[in-house]
Amino acid sequence: MLTERLGLLVEHGIVTRSGDPTHAQKAVYSLTDKGLDLLPVLVAVSAWSQKHHPDTRRPEAVQVVQGGPKWVKRLEAQLRRDHGVG
């Protein structure tokens, strides 16, 4: 099922898939610009979840939501670096 979902994300241009030169059977998935455009949506879903299901809070998600737009911009910049997105 995970392979199917990842394949759909690749097909729709949200992530790219490349091989891992150190392991023939391993794939590396990276976000695209289109995938990074989903960041505000994911932050909004996280904020909703934290409000209505506080028992599912993760410290990283709380930090993003409480940090506001500046923190989201910082996270986006880090993701762009980590995923090699221009």
Image (spheres, rainbow, N blue to C red):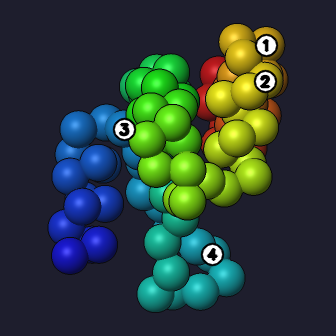
Residue 14 circle label: 3
Q: Distance between the Cα atoms at labels 1 and 4?
A: 36 Å
Task: Please tell me whether mark 2 sits on a helix, a strand or a loop.
Answer: helix
Image quadrant in which you'd find residue 65: top right
**Dot placed on the residue nearer the N-terminal end, 1 or 3:** 3
Q: Amino acid at mark 4?
A: Pro
Image quadrant in which you'd find residue 6: bottom left
**Dot placed on the residue nearer the N-terminal end, 2 or 4:** 4
Residue 62 shown left or right of residue 37 in the figure? right
Residue 56 circle label: none
Residue 21 circle label: 4
Task: Please tell me whether mark 1 sits on a helix, a strand or a loop.
Answer: helix
Q: Nearer the viewer, mark 1 or mark 3?
A: 1
Task: Please tell me whether mark 3 sits on a helix, a strand or a loop.
Answer: loop
Q: Amino acid at mark 2?
A: Gly
Give the residue number, with chain letter if any, for mark 2.
67
Q: Nearer the viewer, mark 2 or mark 1?
A: 2
Contact between marks 2 and 1 (CB within 8 A): the answer is: yes
Q: Distance between the Cα atoms at labels 2 and 4?
A: 37 Å
Instruction: Decide: few, some or many residues near mark 2? Use Cα within 10 Å; few <14, some 14-19, many ≥20.
Output: few
The residue under the point 70% across, 22% down is: 72
Contact between marks 1 and 4 (CB within 8 A): the answer is: no
In percent of width and height, residue 51 lies at: 51, 36
Q: Distance between the Cα atoms at labels 2 and 3?
A: 25 Å
Give the residue number, with chain letter if any, for mark 1.
70
Between residue 59 and residue 30, name the one nearer to us. Answer: 59
Q: Amino acid at mark 1?
A: Lys
